[in-house]
Image: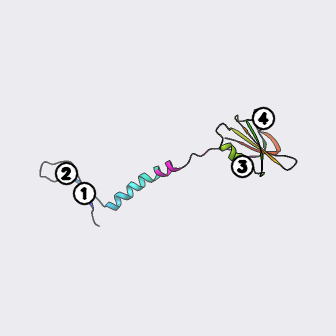
Amino acid sequence: MEIDDCIGLGAAGYGQPPLTEVCIKAEEFVSWRLLLGLPMVVFLSLPAMAQTTYQPNTDRRSETDYEEFVMGRPNPQLCLDACLNSAPCRSWTFVNNPDGSADGRLGNHKQQPVADSCCTSGTR
């Protein structure tokens, strides 16, 4: 085992060896720094994750919804994504219309859920 670095701890006096000497291998020292620093780097690099619910057969529409839009592709995930990308959004509803089209609704309040097979909704 090769020792790359030694650190003297304490002073016994001028010209005297240190009271205690700690020797470590450079590669061990690097690995401990990586182990201590890696979790922090990973934590700081993660984007903030928004929490949301996904509830099939649930309607959360209300008269106070602040945005309603026709969806080119009928996909509830697109409505959920619109909510996550809109700061005031607290609830969303994807609506399957009888004619086959679909609408998305965003609300700035967490509306109470109502059972309805027309919709998929959620809150955040």
Q: Amino acid at mark 3?
A: Leu
Query: Is residue 100 shown in magenta?
Result: no
Q: Residue furthest top?
A: 64
* Extent of the magenta region: 41-56
Left or right, 80 with respect to 5, comes to right
Residue 81 percent coordinates (x, y): 68, 47
Q: Amino acid at mark 4?
A: Ser
Q: Earlier in the sequence, mark 2 or mark 3?
A: 2
Tags 4 and 3 in contact by the CB under 8 Å rule?
no
Rounded to the nearest angstrom, the CA distance separating label 4 from label 3 is 19 Å
Element type where label 3 sits in the image: helix
- The residue at the point 82 percent across, 43 percent down is 116
Q: Amino acid at mark 2?
A: Leu
Q: Residues within 10 Å of mark 2 (few under 14, many from 20)?
A: few
**Foreground residue among 64 and 11:** 64
Residue tagged 4: 62
Residue tagged 3: 78
- The residue at the point 83 percent across, 49 percent down is 101
